[in-house]
Image (cartoon, helix red, strand yellow):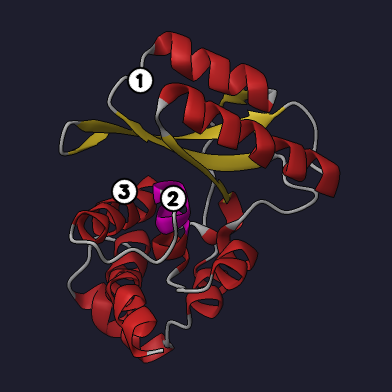
Amino acid sequence: MGRIDKRRILIFRVAFCNSLDEKDIEKIFRKLDSLEKKFGLAIQLFNSENIVSWRHILYACNIASANWRKGFKISRKLSLEILLYTSCQHQIDVGVKRVGLRPGDRYSWIVIVGENIDDNVIGEILDELDANITFMRFDIDPTHIMRVYGVYEEELKLSLKSSENVEEALLNCIIPRMNMVVLREKIV
């Protein structure tokens, strides 16, 4: 858990009761939109395969929120802004393809950002998603992550020299790409 101003940030993995299909994904995002309005939250789900760790999402939340407060908004919703920074993209459709839910997904990362998040709110969100919190360990595929985010082998090797592990090294390569999202939006 982290904080943005007075808002709490909760990031955890969920397991859906069934593998998702396209209709499930559409239904989930309609429900998320309704829940965001009901509770005054930003809620986003991510494909687990393309996320390095919970810190990947936390960094994106912090960068998105800081730029949001400064008026550098790419989208109309903080939850979409978080998706864009997590994906290192300034176009929503490209960002969704990179880190959004996909048919066949059974696990997902979720981030919930808001001031009034309690167990009842989390429970209602999970009920609406037909999902449960999972504490299963998931290993990342560094080669896959490098390909998804355009991290070069030499870049990772340099990052490994000052990092404790591959996960941290990958994050150190991806975070600068997150910071470039708002600049690409202003240049394009």
Q: Looking at the image, is mark 2 or mark 1 earlier in the sequence? A: 2
Residue 92 appears in which quarter of the rendering?
bottom right
Kindly identify which residue carries mark 2: 77
- Residue drawn at 42 percent across, 71 percent down: 88
- Residue drawn at 45 percent across, 74 percent down: 90
> Within the magenta stretch, is there residue 153?
no
Closest to the camera, between mark 3 and mark 1, is 1
Vertical comparison of 69 with 117: above or below: below
Percent across and percent down for residue 70 are 18, 61
> Within the magenta stretch, is there residue 79?
yes
The residue type indicated by label 3 comes to Leu
Q: Characterize the local packing of mark 1: few (<14), some (14-19) or many (20 or more) Cα atoms within 10 angstroms.
A: some
Any part of residue 142 in sight: yes
- Residue drawn at 52 percent across, 51 percent down: 139
Q: Describe residue 122's horizontal placement relative to residue 103 as left or right.
A: left
The disc label shown at residue 126, or none: none
Q: Characterize the local packing of mark 3: few (<14), some (14-19) or many (20 or more) Cα atoms within 10 angstroms.
A: many
* Relative depth, front residue between 158 and 70: 70
Q: Looking at the image, is mark 3 or mark 1 earlier in the sequence? A: 3
Residue 7 appears in which quarter of the rendering?
top left
The disc label shown at residue 58, or none: 3
Q: Secondary structure at mark 3?
A: helix
Q: CA distance from mark 2 to mark 1?
A: 18 Å
Q: Are marks 3 and 2 in contact (CB under 8 Å)?
A: no
Q: Describe residue 29's horizontal placement relative to residue 55 as left or right.
A: right
The disc label shown at residue 117, or none: 1
Magenta-drawn segment: 78-83
* Relative depth, front residue between 118 and 161: 118
